[in-house]
Each structure stands twice: as structure tokens, then as C-alpha cells.
Image (tube, rainbow, N blue to C red):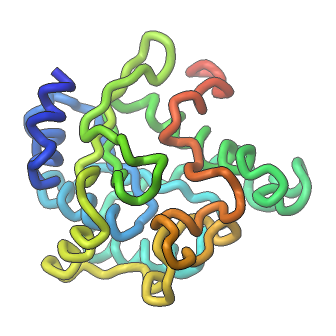
Amino acid sequence: MITELNERFERAHPREVVRWALEESGLGRIAVASAFQADGTCVMHMATEIRPDIPILFLETGFHFAETLAFKEQLVERLGLKVIDLVGDHTVETQTAAFGPRLYERDPERCCDINKVQPMFRALRELEAWITAFRRDSSPSRAGAPIIDQYELEPGREIVKINPVATWTRRDVWRYMKDHDLPHNPLYDLGYASIGCAPCTRMPFPGEPERGGRWAGLSKWECGIHEREALVELPPAGND
């Protein structure tokens, strides 16, 4: 079934994938996960045209650029988004008290686990499927991403992950943005290509992949929410 769907959608417009997910798949509890980057804006636009009240999951880490948070509010108003802010067990201040200052520099894996992985997977436990803006061409770690994936979220509990823009390029994203007159984070105009938490994001150097400015200087491409092994440290459901 999953193989057939991936073959069906490999050359389809992402809108067809989103429509399948929201109207044909039979998946009931479904949400879009977005960091309000350009590709995510496209996916949210497609999804809300079909289901205006679809939940949008946003990881409120406490470390976002001010520009990102301002853009988020702009797009919420523009598209009428139903955003659910996901937060970890620590604020910036309590994280500093518990682990010391600048944890994102000393142990970025733990910082991401606290602020992104754990709150996201707590949210995913309540869903049957989630839609992302994962694109194959944005980094080597994403090059083999399927359009439709089904995996074990935790023992005995499967979830479907839908990557409608997996086959799109950066050019495709910005063409869609222009065609639909969609706004974007002003940090793109300064030269940023992939925008995450402020302390761990810089502009990419010439020749680097789009996500080359994330966790610069480290052998790290992902925060962990797209890596299944990140579940290992999570407590059982009901013991959060």
C-alpha cells in the first residue's frame, strides 16, 4: 500500500498528496507540523484550502528569531491558522538553571531533545498522521525521503508521515509562493536559507546545502523529530 502510494505520487503535485491525506486516506487525527519556513508556508496553504481548521503544530522553543515569531503571527492572521504551540518541560531560564548556560552550544542534541523531540512526540501520540514540509534537496540527510511513510512511533503504535513537497526543489517552493502571493520570513531576504532557532542558525556559505547553516560546524543536520531512534529516551505514554 505505502509503496503503491509513493509510486502514485512521485510525479504528482503536492496538492494531490495533501488532498489524499485529508480527504481520501481515512486518517482521522492528522496535523501539519511547521516551523513557518517557506516550504511549510506552501504546505499550510494547501492544507487549509482543503481543511481550514487543520491543527498546525509549532515548536515554541524559546530560542526563535523575533522575525520568525512576527512572521508566524502574520501568517496566522492571513490564513486563519489554528496553531498549537508545543513547549518542552523547560523555559529558557529553567533550562539554564538545570543544565547551565548555552546548552545549545555545549550539548545541542540534549537541547533539541528537550525543546523539540520530546514535545513533538508527545503531540504525535495523539495523532494518526502528520504532514511535514520535508524536501529531499534541502540536505543530504533528507535525500531519500519518501512521500508517504508509515512507521512505529512506539511499540505497538504506528503513525503515517506525509511529505507532500518531498520532490520539490527550492525553486518550486518560491514559485508557488509567488503564484499565490504568500508572504515569507524577512530573514530570507538577508540571505538565510533554512531558519531554525537563532543560536544555531547562520546563513549558508556558497556551495553549502540549504540546511548548511543549521548547527554549523557540527556533524548534525537534524533536530531529531524526523529520526525514529529519538524515541528511545521518551517515557511511556501517560507518564509525561
Quadrant where the N terminus is found in the figure: top left
Depicted 162 relative to depicted 151: above or below: below
Q: Which residue sits at x=18%, y=72%? A: 176
Q: Quadrant of the C terminus?
A: top right
> Residue 233 at what x, y percent from top left?
68, 27
Number of numbered labels in the structure image: 0
61 versus 236 height, above or below: below
* Residue toward you, 209 or 98: 209
Q: Quadrant of residue 170?
A: bottom left
135 above or below 39? above
- The residue at 16%/53% (across/down) is 14
Outermost residue, bottom direction? 190
Percent x, y of residue 18: 17, 48
Residue drawn 11% across the image and 54% down it: 13
In front: 206, or 238?
Answer: 206
Residue 94 visible? The answer is no
In the image: residue 209, left or right of residue 232: left
Q: Nearer the viewer, residue 106 or 80?
A: 106
Residue 209 visible to an observer of this rendering: yes
Q: Residue at x 31, y 63 (%)?
A: 81
Q: Find the residue positioned furthest to the top.
A: 156
Horizontal side of residue 70 vs 165, given as left or right: right
Give the x, y percent position of residue 225.
52, 42
Q: Nearer the viewer, residue 134 or 42?
A: 134
- The image quarter containing residue 179 is bottom left
